[in-house]
Image: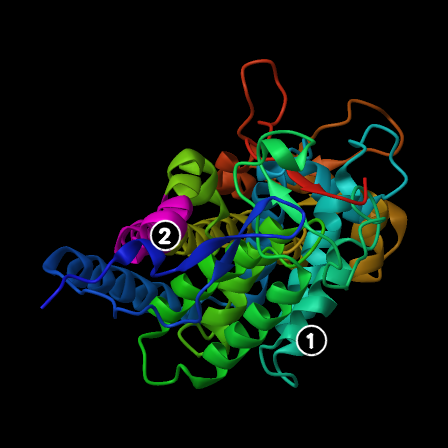
Amino acid sequence: MATPDLRTRAGRTIRQPEGYQAFIPAPLPPDPSLRFDSQLVTVLASASTALGRLDGVAATLPNPELFVAMYVRREAVLSSQIEGTQSTLDDVLAFEIDSDRSKLPDDIEEVVNYVAAMNYGLARLQTLPLSLRLLREIHGKLLSGGRGSEKSPGEFRRSQNWIGGGPRLADATFIPPPPHEMRAALGDLERFLHDAGGQDPLIVCALAHAQFETIHPFLDGNGRVGRLLITFLLCHVKVLHCPVLYLSHYLKQHRGTYYDRLMAVRYEGDWEGWLRFFLTGVATVAQEAEHTARRIVELREVLRREAQSTGMSVNALKLLDHLFEQPVINVKAAQERLGVTFPAANGMIRDLQKAGVLTEVTGGRRNRMFRFDPYLDLFADVDEVTGDGTAPQPTLYEGDTER
């Protein structure tokens, strides 16, 4: 029996009337079927176990919503940094307190939009199945302002786009399907998501993410929507009951390998190599998140115990709990949160400063901002930058013929 040619397993390149070669993806699941060798079985088991442990730990948190809120912001920063933004987690938290601050990066709106898109999508999953409609709605939220707002937010593209090589289609590294083929591929992807109930949900998630990135259905924001899709899928199939797994940190650290694995799927049919990479990321990130969750619980217990031993007021303890949700704060925000006078809020913040919980970071007498350092230090890896102090730039270029 002849050995099947795996090079066209994920699809094939077809010359278009305009002369360029576009990739037309084959429907999922892969054909020939996935080969589960011992290495793939092992990494799948590790990812499933790590994800289960993370979901269990998250369920024991005193207030899991606070943990989720920080991880959504963290994911927004890292996913946006992959696309070249420079905003940090501190910038996002400062924006939430005072959006008029003049020293915030120009691209902060993109990151804040990502937070809004994630929260919107998680809420919509309660009433709307994971579908092309939901992806369009998420895209609309993501590109509602800032860079990319002119790139048809909430609409699938009606022109050819491309990835890599520069601003000309002729120099592209990869050309996704043209619009008419793109719509057929999106329909196939939606059917796969609705009919994949018998397959391992992590395998479904990995296949769907790679397929979405290959289809590249929007003029801009495909990478960010594709990374959002991972979390939405895990929640949709109930692998996670609390949305606390985000892969952007792993994908940012291994960006070159990430793109190489996707290209190997397209041109070599190497779905198994992609699955090993993806599942290793799930296991790694789930273990890191579980560790962080445990440290959050320990930190909260230690700080509350120390605060109570020093006779801190009930309102100050409430403010301490609030800091796990809003770890950058000013006096006005504390006043509004607790429903107390400005002097009372100022006094509580001063007490938390003396206790080493809060640090004043603006250096001024007016409009002072305070940072919950012990907590934010648990998320310190978010602000990775290059040697010149800027966020790393994306290695791929997303282009379109409407420039």
Residue 258 as seen in the image, left or right of residue 373: left
Q: Does any portion of residue 183 appear in the rendered image? A: yes
Q: Which residue is mark 2?
A: 265
Tell me the amino acid under the disc marked 1: Arg
The one of 124 and 378 positioned closer to us in this rendering: 124
How far across and how far down the image is residue 205, in percent?
42, 66
Front of the two marks 1 and 2: 2
* Mark number, residue 160: none
Q: Does any portion of residue 63 appear in the rendered image? A: no
- Per the image, label 1 sits on a secondary structure element best described as helix
Residue 219 as seen in the image, left or right of residue 200: right
Looking at this view, name the residue that lies furthest to the top: 388
Indicate the quadrant where residue 395 lies.
top right
Indicate the quadrant where residue 155 lies.
bottom right
- Per the image, label 2 sits on a secondary structure element best described as helix
- Quadrant of the frame with the N terminus: bottom left
Looking at the image, residue 369 lies above or below residue 150: above
* Mark number, residue 133: 1
Considering the whole magenta stretch, tell me its main secondary structure.
helix
In the rendered structure, does residue 330 fall within the stretch colored magenta? no
**Residue at 44% over, 79% down:** 237
How far across and how far down the image is residue 65, in percent?
58, 66
Given contact means CB atoms under 8 Å apart, are the residues at marks 1 and 2 in contact?
no
Distance from Cα at disc 1 to Cα at disc 2: 27 Å
- Quadrant of the frame with the C terminus: top right
Q: Which residues are magenta?
A: 261-288
**Residue at 27% over, 53% down:** 276
Tell me the amino acid under the disc marked 2: Val
**Residue at 58% over, 70% down:** 186
Q: Earlier in the sequence, mark 1 or mark 2?
A: 1
Looking at the image, residue 60 lies above or below residue 107: below
